[in-house]
Image (cartoon, rainbow, N blue to C red):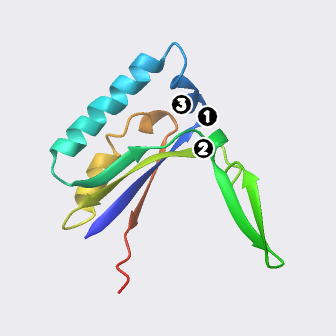
């Protein structure tokens, strides 16, 4: 079964990416990525650029409306993801507990990937 782990980080974590705290921020994520990739469970994973690079597309009255910025105005922003192939959700839950920043505001959402045929 495949699961996606989505990481939603609070703004203060996102700001660390380019602040004086950037080396520690990236070191934690690099160590996590190396470790989870070495587990052999990862199919794919990527960090995402910050929300200022997002583009949202909607259709209103049959017309396409393109807007700069994310769909949801939330305290956290989608920062990245991993797709894991596992036999149960248990290993995904274990990895979620190891996500950098999970103890200080990062939210990990786990969703099974739907098989559409």
In the picture of the structure, the residue carrying the numbered disc 1 is: 11
Residue 62 lies, in percent from the top left, at: 80, 79
**Residue 13: image tag:** 3
- Dot 2 corresponds to which residue? 76
- The answer to which of 18 and 105 lies nearer the viewer is 18
Mark 2 or mark 3, which has the lower sequence index? 3
| For residue 96, above or below residue 59 | above
Looking at this rendering, what residue extends furthest in the right direction? 61
How far apart marks 2 and 3 lie (CA) works out to 9 Å
Image coordinates of residue 88 in percent, x first then y, are: 23, 67
The part of the image, by quadrant, that contains residue 2 is: bottom left
From the image, which quarter does the C terminus lie in?
A: bottom left
Furthest residue to the bottom? 117
Residue drawn 23% across the image and 56% down it: 91
- Mark 1–mark 3 contact, CB under 8 Å? yes
> Any mark on residue 88, and which?
none
Say whether marks 2 and 1 touch (CB < 8 Å): yes
């Amino acid at each position: 079964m495949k699961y996606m782990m989505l990481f939603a980080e609070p703004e203060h974590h996102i700001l660390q990416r380019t602040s004086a705290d950037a080396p520690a921020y990236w070191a934690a994520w690099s160590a996590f990525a190396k470790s989870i990739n070495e587990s052999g469970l990862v199919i794919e994973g990527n960090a995402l650029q910050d929300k200022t690079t997002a583009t949202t597309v909607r259709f209103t009255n049959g017309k396409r409306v393109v807007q700069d910025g994310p769909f949801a105005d939330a305290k956290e922003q989608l920062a990245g993801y991993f797709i894991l192939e596992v036999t149960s959700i248990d290993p995904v839950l274990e990895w979620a507990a190891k996500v950098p920043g999970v103890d200080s505001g990062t939210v990990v959402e786990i969703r099974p990937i739907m098989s559409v045929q």
